[in-house]
Amino acid sequence: MRLIVRILAGAVALAAAAWLIDGISVGPGTTSERALTLLAVAVIFGLVNAFVRPIVRLISIPLFIITLGLFTFVVNALMLLLTAWIGDLFDLAFEVDGFWAALLGALVISVVTFLINVLLPDRYEGR
């Protein structure tokens, strides 16, 4: 159940980024096709953040220290670009047009995900 909620939260955050940022788009199609695309991209985004992001963060520790943590935004943008690239390999209609769109999109996704986590607290923390 917890995994489903996280995937749905990711899909909502990706939808918000696509709605707010001009350089991020979810392809044409019906509303249900776009929703399925967002769910698939949310799964890919979650997998990228679970497996690739820790490795990138470990390698770039000196940059995190030098920039006082601001390099986190760059890493988040790169993870969004990687997600769009992987989505393209699976013929998903999700596009991110360049680094700056990815950076702004990563900021929107972070804020929306934070707000969703505040509104839906994790009830299973102790288990």
Image (cartoon, grey):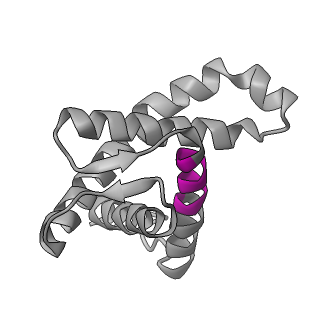
51 over 21 or under it: above or below: above
- In this rendering, position of residue 92 left or right of residue 126: left
* Residue at the image position 55 percent from the left and 52 percent from the top: 106
Q: Residue 82 appears at what percent x and percent y?
A: 41, 34
Q: Residue 31 appears at what percent x and percent y?
A: 18, 74
68 over 108 or under it: above or below: above
* Residue at the image position 47 percent from the left and 78 percent from the top: 120
Q: Residue 85 appears at what percent x and percent y?
A: 33, 34
Magenta-drawn stretch contains 24? no
Q: Compare residues 37 and 52 and report the one nearer the observer.
A: 37
- In this rendering, position of residue 40 left or right of residue 18: left
Q: Which residues are magenta?
A: 101-109
Q: Residue 73, located in which quarter of the rendered image?
A: top right
Q: Compare residues 81 and 29 and report the one nearer the observer.
A: 29
- In this rendering, position of residue 97 left or right of residue 31: right
Please identify the dominant SS of the magenta region: helix
* Residue at the image position 45 percent from the left and 69 percent from the top: 16
Magenta-drawn stretch contains 103? yes
